[in-house]
């Protein structure tokens, strides 16, 4: 294979793609999903006949563009996955210049950070189980990268992620809104480091509602709780103490602060 062109990804680099794909066999087409796409191959997950060693044709579509790859590959390894599906390790063969150029375009789209296909396919109002299943189909490194710069739609889904590193990346997202920060602070899977990060973020370090949400978290370190309580001014303390729904433990800390 020719050496990489300027600006292209290296041959060995694999990207956490989740792209709609169809394997074309002489009698049937088999829809599946392509993961870990590289310039030399990919991992397919779906329901197939036994294909180890076979040459197959496949179409890979990028959901945020009009690019569809038509490639040939050889199945070098197969193993069972969940729900009766299989995982096929596919090595690309017969890569013409035109096919190689199209592959570079799709890899560039992935590098640019478009949403993975399972998350893109979620509809507004999707149930927690649907969101969880979609998130589990996307490799953790890709979810972390997406959380750090996701738009409002993706942030709503990623806030339901159970992986602490994804949630911490979401807390660092420069476009996170105060209401989202409050909702994020209530997620039980947060690590204490993420609570610390939220509390020190200048965007809402003085936002009483965000600070109360952080104080309400069951995993807040005592030192952080004391620092937040000590940071309230008298007017904020009076308002929070009188707010319905404030946890009693927080109310007691604030009342002790007033007495001090």
Image (cartoon, rainbow, N blue to C red):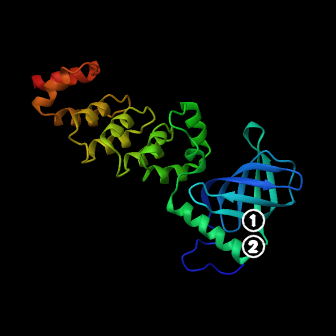
Q: Say whether residue 49 is left or right of residue 134.
A: right
Give how far across and how far down residue 221 sits, in percent.
33, 34
Which residue is depicted at the point 79% across and 64% down?
A: 73
Give how far across and how far down residue 79 sits, in percent.
79, 48
Q: Nearer the viewer, residue 33 or 137?
A: 33
Question: Do the residues bearing badges 1 and 2 touch, measured as CB atoms within 8 Å?
Answer: yes
Residue 16, label in figure: none
What residue is disc 1 on?
71
Q: Nearer the viewer, residue 131 or 251?
A: 131
As measured in the structure, the alpha-carbon distance from the residue carrying label 1 to the one carrying label 2 is: 7 Å
Residue 95, label in figure: 2
Give the quadrant of the N terminus. bottom right
Q: Is residue 250 above or below residue 175?
A: above
Q: How many marks?
A: 2
Q: Say whether residue 257 is left or right of residue 24.
A: left
Give how far across and how far down residue 113 sits, in percent.
51, 58
Which residue is depicted at the point 75% across and 48% down?
A: 31
Q: Say whether residue 229 is left or right of residue 31.
A: left
Tell me where residue 225 sits by quadrant.
top left
Which residue is depicted at the point 70% across and 59% down?
A: 42
Q: Element under label 2?
A: loop
Which residue is depicted at the point 69% across and 81% down?
A: 2
| Few, some or many residues within 10 Å of mark 1 (<14, 14–19, 20+) | many
Give how far across and how far down residue 256 sits, in percent.
16, 23
């Amino acid at each position: 294979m020719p050496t990489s062109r300027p600006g292209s990804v290296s041959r060995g680099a694999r990207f956490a793609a989740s792209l709609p794909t169809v394997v074309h066999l002489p009698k049937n087409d088999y829809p599946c999903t392509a993961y870990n796409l590289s310039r030399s191959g990919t991992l397919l997950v779906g329901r197939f006949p036994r294909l180890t060693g076979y040459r197959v044709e496949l179409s890979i579509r990028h959901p945020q563009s009009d690019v569809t790859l038509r490639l040939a590959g050889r199945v070098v390894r197969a193993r069972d996955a969940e729900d009766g599906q299989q995982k096929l390790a596919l090595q690309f063969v017969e890569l013409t210049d035109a096919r190689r150029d199209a592959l570079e375009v799709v890899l560039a789209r992935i590098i640019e950070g478009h949403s993975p296909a399972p998350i893109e396919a979620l509809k507004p109002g999707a149930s927690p189980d649907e969101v969880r299943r979609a998130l589990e189909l996307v490799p953790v490194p890709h979810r972390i990268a997406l959380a750090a710069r996701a738009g409002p739609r993706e942030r709503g889904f990623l806030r339901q992620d159970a992986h602490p590193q994804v949630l911490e990346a979401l807390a660092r997202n420069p476009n996170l809104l105060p209401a989202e920060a409050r909702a994020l602070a209530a997620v039980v899977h947060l690590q204490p480091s993420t609570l610390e990060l939220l509390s020190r973020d200048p965007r809402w370090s003085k936002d009483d509602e965000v600070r109360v949400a952080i104080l309400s978290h069951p995993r807040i370190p005592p030192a952080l709780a004391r620092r937040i309580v000590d940071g309230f001014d008298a007017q904020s303390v009076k308002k929070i103490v009188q707010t319905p729904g404030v946890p009693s433990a927080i109310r007691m800390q604030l009342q002790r602060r007033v007495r001090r």
